[in-house]
Image (tube, helix red, strand yellow):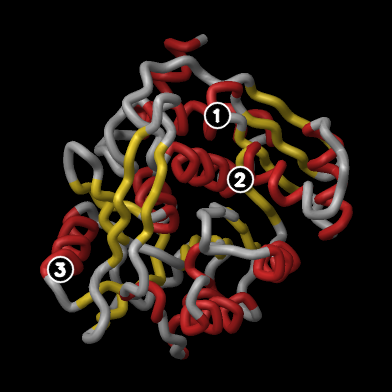
Amino acid sequence: MNTKPHSVICFGEILWDILPSAAVPGGAPMNVTYHLHKLQKDPALITRIGDDEKGKELRRIFSSAGVCTDFFQLDQEHETGKVYAKMNEQHEVVYDIVKPVAWDFISWNESLQSAVSESDYFIFGSLAVRNRISKNTLFQLLESANKKVLDINLRHPHFNQKIIEELISKADFLKLNLAELELISEMYFNYKDLKDRAKALMDKFHLAKMVVTLGAEGAILFWEEKEYKHNGYTVNVKDTIGSGDAFLAGLISKWMENASPQSALQFASALGAFIAGKTGGCPDYEVQEIERFIREMK
């Protein structure tokens, strides 16, 4: 096992997205880890796979890509995660997430605690807490985490108001899309304006930083009393799988480089759009392609 500290640790699901055309590796934490690795930020993923061919294939794919798999736990009882994904008319993905599977049973151990405490960023979501085993492990690790980033990633029926509140209350930074902002804010407020919803939510949970992705309309970043907006990039969309995860990885990578909030938002928007123009959440690419993409779009 690699004993060198990782700058970023992601926690949660790894799975196969079974599309009409093919099966591709996925899961939001895995996608974020993959893109942070492509951006040379030395991340690691805490997850769990089944002792089956699908699990072995995931480990092989990401090991060969150079992604750290030291914290891939092996489950003898439960199969590797699967999601049946279908595209709707708006090019959005509708998911049927199989349960229970291996990543529902991520178990705590001291090596995980050590890795998280030594990392700068800890990224987590809501899907991995649908089972109490992974949930308990996550909340133990959050006690040792430094900068805690919540990618809320709500998927019916795998969440409720109580778990949303528990997760947001632990976060230093919240990333969510417009539909998630509307859903969560309507639990507490009657505001209709996006900025009013966002600011009320930040006030309620004492958040200084939050980003709302707006699909083709870009994203808006709320950063310590200031707002930053990017209108997005127009691309020929293949599918939206992993584009939000790529966006988050791009944002975090630029924070690690001490980029300005607006510059970080621009790069994140470009990476998210670039991935939407590809098939699947983890296509192969080089950082230089994103930089060229930004120049061409200007």
Please give the residue where the numbered disc 3 appears in the rendered image: 56
Mark 2 neighbour density, 10 Å: few (under 14) some (14–19) many (20 or more): some
Image quadrant assignment for residue 53: bottom left
Q: Residue furthest left?
A: 53
How far from the left and from the top, in percent, is residue 169?
75, 67
Give me the C-alpha separation between circle 2 and circle 1: 22 Å
**Residue at the image point whose x is 78% and y is 54% from the top:** 187
Amino acid type, mark 3? Lys
Q: Earlier in the sequence, mark 3 or mark 2?
A: 3
How far from the left and from the top, in percent, is residue 284?
25, 38
**Residue at the image point whose x is 61% and y is 73% from the top:** 145
Please give the residue where the numbered disc 2 appears in the rendered image: 255
297 or 11: which is nearer to us?
A: 11
Q: Could one spot residue 203 in this view of the protein?
A: yes
Classify residue 9 as left or right of residue 165: left
Q: Quadrant of the N terminus?
A: bottom left
Mark 1 neighbour density, 10 Å: few (under 14) some (14–19) many (20 or more): some
Amino acid type, mark 1? Gly
Classify residue 275 as left or right of residue 69: right
Instruction: Establish if 144 lies above or below 253.
Output: below
Q: Do the numbered discs 1 and 3 sit on residues whose CB atoms are within 8 Å?
A: no
Instruction: Tell me the number on the disc at residue 215.
Output: 1
- Which of label 3 and label 2 is nearer to you? 3
Give me the C-alpha separation between circle 1 and circle 3: 34 Å
**Residue at the image point whose x is 39% and y is 31% from the top:** 88
Q: Could one spot residue 9 in this view of the protein?
A: no
